[in-house]
Structures are given as structure tokens and as C-alpha cells.
Image (cartoon, rainbow, N blue to C red):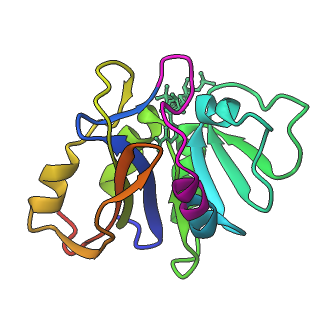
Amino acid sequence: MYSNLHIVVALTENRVIGTETNELPWHIPEDLKHFKKLTQNRTIIMGRKTLESFPNGPLPNRKHIVLSNQEKPAHYGDSVTFVNEEQLFAFLDASDPHIDLFVIGGGKIYELLYPYCNKKYITLVHMDIKEGVKFPYNVREIANKREHKTLYRSGIRRHNGIAYEFFELERISST
Ligand SMILES: NC(=O)c1ccc[n+]([C@@H]2O[C@H](COP(=O)([O-])OP(=O)(O)OC[C@H]3O[C@@H](n4cnc5c(N)ncnc54)[C@H](OP(=O)(O)O)[C@@H]3O)[C@@H](O)[C@H]2O)c1
């Protein structure tokens, strides 16, 4: 585990995080603000498809570490670095444990890095979506297991008929 590595994810009860066409299935302004507040001026780690899902390109004021087996396309500027898996772990190993890093998706990257992450910033979206890209772990199980403590739970909020809540969990053992 890396104590400075944290996951940020919004997902439904049945773990849907996105559409097969690389989009978020909801629009929740407070969640976008929450994401921005957490990641502003930080380093964010993502899969290549998630980078491509940003409608206006790389996010301002953030350093992007992008997992890919491809070369970085020339149109991405200095705020974007493409790494393969070996380079990603070398980057994590060399990182300053006092500087937080945020894993922001999608499914493939969550699957790879979840076991190494400390805090989980989870937005649980109460929508019934059957199909899509899924978070590879069961969040209810994560919250119930003794290896995490709940640092924060917002309670239910609503936007345009969509109910959602924020959780913050922290790992309490390295298992
Ligand atoms: N709700 C949320 O919080 C949230 C957050 C982020 C994304 N999303 C959603 O998630 C979906 C995208 O997720 P996804 O799983 O399809 O894609 P992804 O994880 O964003 O990216 C997958 C890509 O990452 C690279 N990759 C993955 N594992 C690798 C490895 N071990 N070594 C080297 N490269 C590797 C590959 O890129 P190359 O093909 O270039 O090699 C692969 O095609 C979208 O629908 C998006 O909207 C939701």
C-alpha cells in the first residue's frame, strides 16, 4: 500500500461508473465540485480512456499520469505524462509519501491500483443503471470490512431527482 495514494470514484449501488461510450451516466454538479476540490493542484492518475473522456482535454491545474501502452499523442502538453505499468509503479515507489496522489479511473486503473490505495473518496449514486463500465470491487463490502474506517459520510443529497452521498474511507490495515 502507498499511504499517499487515494481513489476518487462515483458509482451506483451495482458499481456502474461509466458508459461503454466513455461518458459519465449522470451530471451532478456537487460531485464535480467535490472532485475539483480534492484534485486541484494535485497529481491525478488515470487510464488512457479516462483522459480521452474529458470533453475539454486535460484538466487545468493538475498533473496527469496516464497509464497506456501507447506513445503520448503530440497534442497533449506538459501536464500529461504517459506511462506503462512498470513506469507507473516506479513513479509510485519514488513518490513523496507526504504528497497525495489521486487515482481517478476508469475501471482498468481502479482494478490495478485499488489494492495499493489508502483513502477512498466515494460518491454513491442512487441510480438504477444496468449496463456500463463497472468498478471492480464491492464498495459495501469494503465499507463493512474491518480493514477500513469511515472518516466521513454526508448523508443523502439530491440533484434533479438523483440521490447521492459522499463517503470517505481509510484503510486501517495493510491486508
Ligand atoms: N464514475 C467515475 O468516477 C469515473 C471515473 C473515471 C472514468 N469513468 C468512466 O470509466 C470508463 C473508462 O474506464 P475503462 O476501464 O474503460 O478505461 P480506463 O481505465 O480509463 O483506460 C483503459 C486504458 O488504460 C490503459 N491500461 C489499462 N491497464 C493497463 C496496463 N496494465 N498497462 C498499460 N496500460 C494499461 C490502456 O490504454 P491503451 O489502450 O492506450 O494501452 C487501456 O485501454 C468511462 O466510461 C469513464 O466515463 C468513471
Q: Position of residue 62 (x, y in %)?
A: 74, 60
Q: Position of residue 61 (x, y in %)?
A: 79, 62
Residue 139 visible at all: yes
What residue is at 60 percent from the left and 61 percent from the top?
Answer: 33
Of 51 and 153, which appears nearest the observer? 153
Residue 94 visible at all: no
Q: Is residue 36 above or below residue 111?
A: below
User: What residue span does the magenta drawing correspond to?
Assistant: 19-34
What residue is at 28 percent from the left and 67 percent from the top?
Answer: 155
Residue furthest to the front in view is: 161
The quarter of the picture where the C terminus appears is: bottom left
Q: Position of residue 150 (x, y in %)?
A: 23, 73
Of 42 and 54, which appears nearest the observer? 54
Query: On the picture, is 171 further left or further right than 60?
Result: left
What residue is at 62 percent from the left and 55 percent from the top?
Answer: 44
Dividing the picture into quarters, in which one does residue 107 lie? Answer: top left
Prevailing secondary structure of the magenta residues: loop
Query: On the picture, is 113 further left or further right than 155?
Result: right
Magenta-span inclusion, residue 93: no
The quarter of the picture where the N terminus appears is: bottom left
Q: Is residue 164 above or below residue 169?
A: above
Residue furthest to the bottom in view is: 98
Of 94 and 165, which appears nearest the observer? 165
Q: Is residue 88 above or below residue 84?
A: below
Magenta-span inclusion, residue 31: yes
What residue is at 20 percent from the left and 43 percent from the top?
Answer: 138
Query: On the picture, is 73 further left or further right than 172?
Result: right
Q: Position of residue 58 (x, y in %)?
A: 77, 44
Of 34 and 134, which appears nearest the observer? 34
Dividing the picture into quarters, in which one does residue 101 lie? Answer: bottom right
Dividing the picture into quarters, in which one does residue 3 lie? Answer: bottom left
